[in-house]
Image (cartoon, helix red, strand yellow):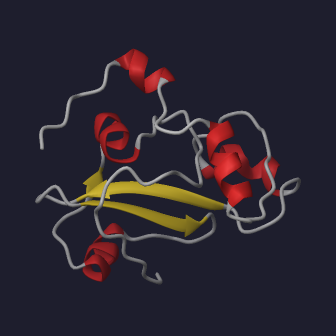
Amino acid sequence: MTQQKPSTDQMDCDLPTSPETLMATLDDLGVAYDLHHHEAVHTVAESAHLDATIPGTHCRNLFVRDKKQNMFLVVLANDTQVDLKHLQTLLDCGRLSFGSADRLWTYLALNQALSVHLRRSTTKQTTQSLSY
C-alpha cells in the first residue's frame, strides 16, 4: 500500500474523525469521559499549570522509530524519566529516534499542535503495552 504524503493544509485541517464524532462514539459505547479545553502545550513544563486544574495522571507522548522504520507511541507519566537506550532494550528494537511530523501525520493522523489522547484506529497494526 502506498501512503501519500499529507499536505500542510491537510495536516492543519482534515482529521480522520472529528471531535464531535469521537465524543458521540464514546457516548454510544457508554464510555465516561471529561472534556477539558486548554491551549496547546508542547512540553511538560508548559503543561505544569494545567496539572492543578485537571485531575488524573498527566502524561506525555513520545513518537519514536527505529532504523527498520518500526514506529512506537510511548505514553509516560510526566514525571517518568526515560532513557532511550533502555527503552530500545524494552522494545527489543534498534536505535530509537523521534518520528518526524510527516510520520506522525501518516501513522497517527496527528500534527504536532494537537494534544489527542484518544483516536480512532486507522491501521491494523498491532499495539503492544509495556511497563517502564
In the image as oriented, which residue stretches furthest toward the front? 28
Q: In the rendered image of this protein, does residue 2 appear above or below residue 128?
A: above
Tell me what residue is drawn at x 32 percent, y 19 percent. 7
Residue 72 horizontal side relative to residue 3, left or right: right
Q: Going 78% across and 67% down the picture, which residue do you hit?
A: 56
Give the total number of marks visible in the rendering: 0
Along the line of sight, the residue nearer the viewer: 131 or 36? 36
* 62 on left or right of 69: right
| Coordinates of residue 77 in the picture (x, y in percent) | 61, 68
Locate the N terminus and report the quarter of the image it occupies.
Answer: top left
In percent of the image, x 77 and y 38: which residue is there?
38
Q: Image check: 108 left or right of 81?
A: left
Q: Is residue 70 left or right of residue 25?
A: left
Between 41 and 2, the residue placed more toward the observer is: 2
Tell me: residue 35, above or below residue 87.
above
Q: Examine the image and state in which quarter residue 69 appears.
A: bottom left
Residue drawn where x is 37% and y is 49% of the image: 122
Spot occupied by residue 93 in the image (x, y as percentages of width and height)? 19, 73
Q: Residue furthest right?
A: 53
In this view, the residue in front, 114 or 86, is 114
Residue 35 picture location, percent across and down = 79, 49
Measured as percent of width and height from the top left, residue 14 is found at: 47, 26
On screen, residue 116 above or below 86? above
- Above or below, 39 relative to 129: above
